[in-house]
Amino acid sequence: MSDQAESLSVALFSEMFMADQLARTALSKALPKGMELSHFSVLNHLANTGEPKSPAQLARTFHVTRGAMTNTLGKLEWAGHVHIHPDWDDARRKLVTISPAGRKARDTALSAIAPIIADVVEAIGPDRVRAALPVLREIRARFDEHD
């Protein structure tokens, strides 16, 4: 790899890491009291897919350990935001579904963070954001291959 390509790579990933950190901080501050970004992410995923998921499937989706997902799901279950129940087809497995309270908590959280995200997109410009999405998706896909 040439020095120029290496500098470009370092600059790109430095910006991505800093943007990630700043976005996580801003969104975490805006979330309702007691909700963490990981909680919102799981609730949002369950709300969008509309189908039960096993804890292992969720762990794979979010690229976290099963233990980390078990911890997150335990907190969400305690808050009444998800239901964890046996898989009736395979009693060894459990399935997770979003509860009505979880859907409401997700909607409340989304209402809190949507203006922050919309402001960023508006400031950058929707056309420039649309142009950046394919590159970001390809970067994600490349890392997904190495997982």
Image (tube, rainbow, N blue to C red):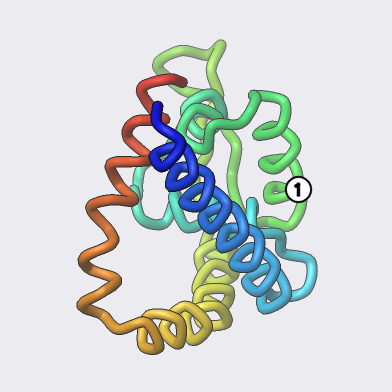
Q: Nearer the viewer, residue 2 or 84?
A: 2
**In the image: residue 2, left or right of residue 138:** right
Looking at the rendered structure, the kind of residue marked 1 is Lys
**In the image: residue 15, left or right of residue 32:** left
Farthest front residue?
Answer: 3
Quarter of the image with the N terminus is top left
Secondary structure category for the residue under label 1: helix
**In the image: residue 74, left or right of residue 121:** right
Q: Which residue is mark 1?
A: 75
Percent across and percent down for residue 18 are 62, 59
Q: Nearer the viewer, residue 109 or 54?
A: 109
Q: Could one spot residue 64 in this view of the protein? A: yes
Q: Residues within 10 Å of mark 1 (few under 14, many from 20)?
A: some
Q: Compared to 98, does 32 lie above or below?
A: below
What's the residue at 34%, 30% (across, down)? 142
Q: Compared to 121, does 2 lie above or below?
A: above
What's the residue at 57%, 82% (across, down)? 112
**In the image: residue 127, left or right of residue 75:** left
Q: Compared to 143, does 25 lie above or below?
A: below
Q: Could one spot residue 42 in this view of the protein? A: no
